[in-house]
Amino acid sequence: MITEAAYAKINLGLNILGKRADGYHEVAMVMQSVGLSDTITISEGKGIEISTNIAGLSCGPDNLAYKAAALLAERAGLEPNVHIDLEKRIFMAAGLAGGSSDAAAVLRGLNRYWGLGLTNEELRQEAAKLGSDIPFCIEGGTALALGRGEIIEPLEDLPETIVVLAKPRGIEVSTAWVYKNYNEGRVIRVPKIRRMAEHIAEGAPALVPYMANVLETVTIPEYPVLASLKAAMVGAGAYYAMMSGSGPTVFAFVDSQDTARQVLAALADFDVETALTTTLGREI
């Protein structure tokens, strides 16, 4: 039996550079792992079997964990007789790469379970065939993501930072819908991605002047509660709050556990899922 942790990610900066010939968007992002995680357990099974603690989550061929297992089995020329259990804690459809991180954990876990000996770079190449966030999730940590998100340049680890996550219940955002409705003309604040990369070692407060997520211009007008969440978090003492990915999760940076508790208390009037966590370094 093999167990892997699948860590959520947040976007410290997300910019769209244009539309590509293949239909995807060219992006530049700084991605960051946080401690909120799912647990992936791999054991013997018949074919590819997926189980989960979340009612209604598909366990069939459309599940990214299933796709990851099928892909790696095909590469290895193996019959994939495995049972994969997904113990979900990462908020669903939340902009936190929960499904992508699960798929990356399956690739890492099956690489060990089957004794394939693939390097992380080889796993990233396989991951890129499944989805844009999955290559980052192979190692996590702090990284620059380019192309459609699959080109990963590891950065120095961001010094540990306390993070509060909040996701409104009942709101699930389609990443495809957000990108389809993106309009560069609505963007007021653009992240300075390279400047962020240069200041990572100084810690999260040094990044704040350069942080932004251009996709907020799509998701927040559709779900104004996200703006209210950001304002409440900053009003309670967070030194920055921003939407992660295509949303709807909002994250806040705080300077202490006491401030984190104040921020969580300020969210009591909202119908939200919350988590208190920290940033994580890269898994080598």
Image (cartoon, rainbow, N blue to C red):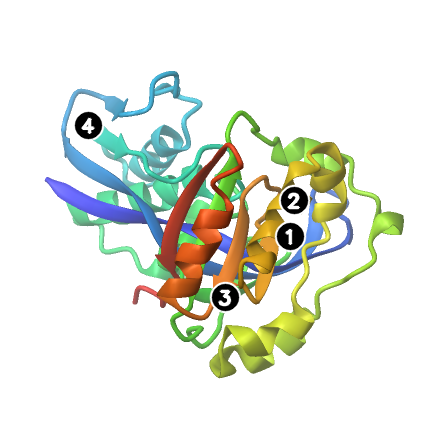
- Kind of residue at disc 2: Ser
Q: On the picture, is 40 further left or further right than 182?
A: left
- Alpha-carbon span between mark 1 and mark 4: 44 Å
Q: Are marks 1 and 4 in contact (CB under 8 Å)?
A: no
Please give the label number shown on residue 231: 1
Secondary structure beneath disc 3? strand
The amino acid at mark 4 is His
Residue type for callout 3: Ala
Q: Which residue is mark 2?
A: 228
- Name the N-terminal-most of marks 1 and 4: 4
Instruction: In this rendered view, identify the residue nearer to me: 279 or 252.
Output: 252
Q: Number of marks in the image?
A: 4
**CA distance for labels 4 and 2:** 42 Å
Which label sits on residue 5?
A: none
Eyeballing the image, is 235 above or below 78?
below
Residue displayed at 42% across by 59% down:
260
Residue ID for mark 4? 83
- How far separated are the C-alphas under marks 4 and 3? 31 Å
Residue 239 in percent (x, y) is at 57, 67
From the image, tell me which residue sits under label 3: 143
Q: Secondary structure at mark 2?
A: helix
**Foreground residue among 253 and 181:** 253
Residue nearer the viewer, 37 or 124 = 37
Q: Give residue 275's position: percent from left, percent from top.
A: 39, 47
Q: Earlier in the sequence, mark 1 or mark 3?
A: 3
Mark 2 vs 1: CB contact within 8 A: yes
Q: Nearer the viewer, mark 1 or mark 4?
A: 1
The quadrant of the rendering that contains the N terminus is: top left
Mark 3 or 2: in front is 2
Q: CA distance from mark 3 to mark 2?
A: 29 Å
Residues at marks 2 and 1, CA–CA distance in whole angstroms: 5 Å
Give coordinates of residue 164: x percent, y percent: 45, 54
